[in-house]
Image (cartoon, rainbow, N blue to C red):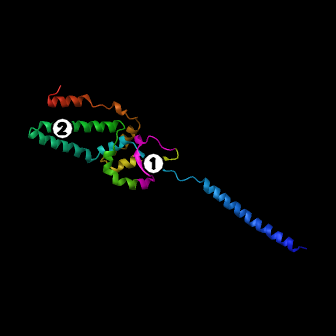
Amino acid sequence: MEGPTMRTNNKYIVSALIVIPFLFGVLLSDQAFARKKPAAIKIGTYDSRIIIFAWSRTDLLKQHVAKIGQLSDSARKVHDTARLKELSVEAMSFQHLLHQVVFSNGSVSSFMEVVKDKLPELAKKVGVSIIVSKWELNYNDPSFEIIDVTNQVAALFQPKEDISRMAADIAGQAPVPIEEMVIEIDMLDQYCTMFGKK
């Protein structure tokens, strides 16, 4: 026969059997939550050589060359040699810049201005927080995830032809060290011939 003390003890035991598993479950879920890693930051990178190649397959390059040509023609008509020299140096400098970005890892930041308004939408679509040239990413924390978005960024320029084959060829080669990208001798010779320099 159970006395009052026995019944009280049984209630405590039953309560303990209910409460202890509950507390154990709470503790386990708290530990699991504490161990849960935060979502990795995703960085989108692109090969700038392919980006400039895509840019060169739009009307933008033609427009730039045509503009320099028109300005040069105007200066030639009025025999403005000083202006012709300036335009020749500008054309050589631009050509040198193109060589640095097509064959090496020169910056394409000024060319990216054309598509900068489209980058937030692309970043959201591919799930990245940052889009940057792969050559400008000097270090990344191992917890950051790197995603190649070269093709998506190149497509923003809407090149007039299929560039996939050439892009694959470019990607398969290491960039020429930029310090080796000097101004070509034939460009300097052409300038000297035009303006009577030795």
Q: Using a 10 Å C-alpha cutoff, classify the residue at mark 1 as few (fewer than 14 neighbours), some (14 to 19) or many (20 or more).
A: many
The three-letter amino acid code for the residue at tag 1 is Ile
Spatial CA span between label 1 and label 2 = 41 Å
Rendering coords of residue 140 (x, y %): 48, 43
Name the spot of residue 29 as percent of width and height, x first. Answer: 65, 59
Front disc: 1 or 2: 2
Q: Secondary structure at mark 1?
A: strand
Give the magenta range.
123-141
Q: Residue at x 44, y 40 (%)?
A: 138
Image quadrant occupied by the C terminus: top left
Residue farthest right in this picture: 1
Q: Nearer the viewer, residue 43 or 158?
A: 43
- Dividing the picture into quadrants, the one containing residue 76 is top left
Can residue 73 be found in the magenta stretch?
Answer: no
Q: What residue appears at the point 23 percent right and 36 percent down from the top-left corner?
A: 92
Front residue of 86/168: it is 86
Residue 87 position, x and y percent, is 18, 39
Q: Which residue is mark 1?
A: 43
Classify residue 23 by image quadrant.
bottom right
